[in-house]
Image (tube, rainbow, N blue to C red):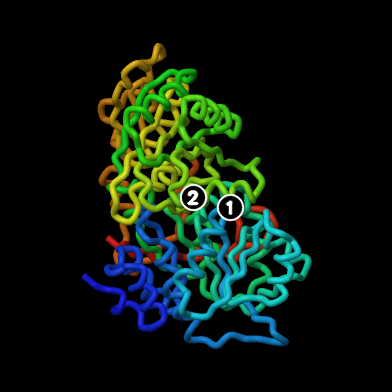
Amino acid sequence: MSHFGQLLDDENVLKRVAKLGYHTPTPIQEAAIPHILEGDNVMGAAPTGTGKTAAFMLPVLQLLGQHPRREEESYTFPRVLLIAPTRELAQQLAANFRDYGRNCGNRVLLLCGGQNPRDQFEKMARGGDIVVATPGRLYELMTQKRVDLTQIQCLILDEADRLLDLGFAEDLQRIVRRLPESRQNLLFSATFDTSVRELAAELMPDAIELGQKDANRTNINVSQRLHPVDHQDKGNATVTLLHDHRFAQVMVFTKTKKGADVLTEQLKREGFQAEVLHGDKVQAERDRILDAFREHKLRVLVTTDVASRGIDIEHLPAVINHDLPPIAHDYIHRIGRTGRAGEKGVAISLVAAHEVDTLTEIETLIGRVLPREDLIGHVPSHSVPETGPGIRPGQRKKKNEPKKGGKKGAAAQKTSLGHTEELTSVPRANRAPVRPVQKKKKAPVRAEGNLFTGKKKVTKRSID
């Protein structure tokens, strides 16, 4: 078992790591740090709460210390660009960079919506070593020529799948085109899907993929279960759960902003200390509510998926899914708010009959059936059909039908250490007849199609 002194040699970083109480690197940290220090392009995945943020921030801080900053007329040229999908995550990542690098003397510049424009422009006039930004705001400032990214040496995309889910592909494309071609690229996410792999293959030549076996897994420290309930009874069922379990703190996720508002008002009427967080709140109010929850001054935070990614709440014992998320991957991120840093957590989902398809997608993604328990006093009149990974309600396997992802499929996907493969997938029904392999001509660059034209190979290396 290694320790951080075997991975890093920057004394300022190591002192801060020790001060924060970090002793043994997590698997993703142990796997990623050496490759990042070598200057490799890295595509990393691991369950939420397993230290992905430190896995890229600590080695990047060491690299910044090894390369002198460039300054002109009191302006510091940014050398690291970190792009995150939401304001809340960008704010937290900027705070993490400042915290981990407290002894390193780096300046962190946060560029996202909801900030005072005058203050932001004043800070941009001074520049910074590290820029943390949301893509829309960053591209707007780049077109206004208020930020200079010509000296960027490292690009980091955090929660890459969410960046694509939120429709930032075009902004990312425009931003990357304006960055220096010679740079290091790091992509991290708790979940890998086809679009993320395609992005990595196109953006990062010869990227090293870490944590493939952990991708799309839920944290083993989180106990998961579901309660079948009727849709109109979910508010009352949430009240019962809060009374029965007496969690010190809990984060409750809803599907819509209106649903979050309605539930919060019901909880307040029942005497619970509750606040609501969603995109309609002004930034100052969002900051106030999140700070109160982080400081354990608020017991119940009702929120949409605006808080499902990357928000780190220490010692959060439980998460309740009042509604299942519309995107299956977001289930992993939601329940990843609890059970962090080796602690135990509980994730409870209230599932109505009309959500059975979403439930099946989630169980297929995580590779397990969520255990069911009737909630006393809330047994539904409309039952939730039995489900399982890859099986639609009422569907039965044919007698000799091979299992999805069986030995044959697994063998076809398995690669040895250092082996490269093209990250493409074509449905069997659409495959062309097998023909002799011929050297293909390079396709012309087109405006439409994938995020970045010209697919490149990705090297797979598991951290397990």
- When the figure is inspected, residue 445 is found, relative to residue 394, above or below; the finding is below
Q: What amino acid type should be assigned to the residue bearing mark 2? A: Arg
Q: Position of residue 313 (x, y in %)?
A: 43, 51
- Mark found first going from the N terminus, 2 or 1: 1
Q: What amino acid type should be assigned to the residue bearing mark 1? A: Thr
Q: Position of residue 102 (x, y in %)?
A: 47, 75
Q: Residues within 10 Å of mark 1 (few under 14, many from 20)?
A: many
Q: Quadrant of residue 17?
A: bottom left
Query: Total label count?
Result: 2
Residues at circles 2 and 1 in contact by the CB criterion of under 8 Å: yes
- When the figure is inspected, residue 172 is found, relative to residue 67, above or below; the finding is above
Task: Please tell me whether mark 1 sits on a helix, a strand or a loop.
Answer: loop
| Closer to the camera in the image, 186 or 83 | 83
> Which quarter shows the C terminus?
bottom left
Task: Please tell me whether mark 2 sits on a helix, a strand or a loop.
Answer: loop
Give the labeled residue for mark 1: 86
Q: Residues within 10 Å of mark 2 (few under 14, many from 20)?
A: many
Q: Is residue 130 left or right of residue 124?
A: left
Give the labeled residue for mark 2: 309
- When the figure is inspected, residue 156 is found, relative to residue 264, above or below; the finding is below
Q: Position of residue 297 (x, y in %)?
A: 46, 46
Q: How many angstroms separate mark 2 from mark 1 (CA)?
A: 8 Å
Furthest residue to the left? Answer: 1
Furthest residue to the top? Answer: 381
| Closer to the camera in the image, 69 or 11 | 11
Q: Is residue 25 left or right of residue 295?
A: left
Tell me the residue at 45%/52% (across/down): 295
Q: Position of residue 148 (x, y in %)?
A: 70, 75
| Closer to the camera in the image, 312 or 402 | 312
Tell me the residue at 30%/33% (across/down): 369
Q: Quadrant of residue 171?
A: bottom right
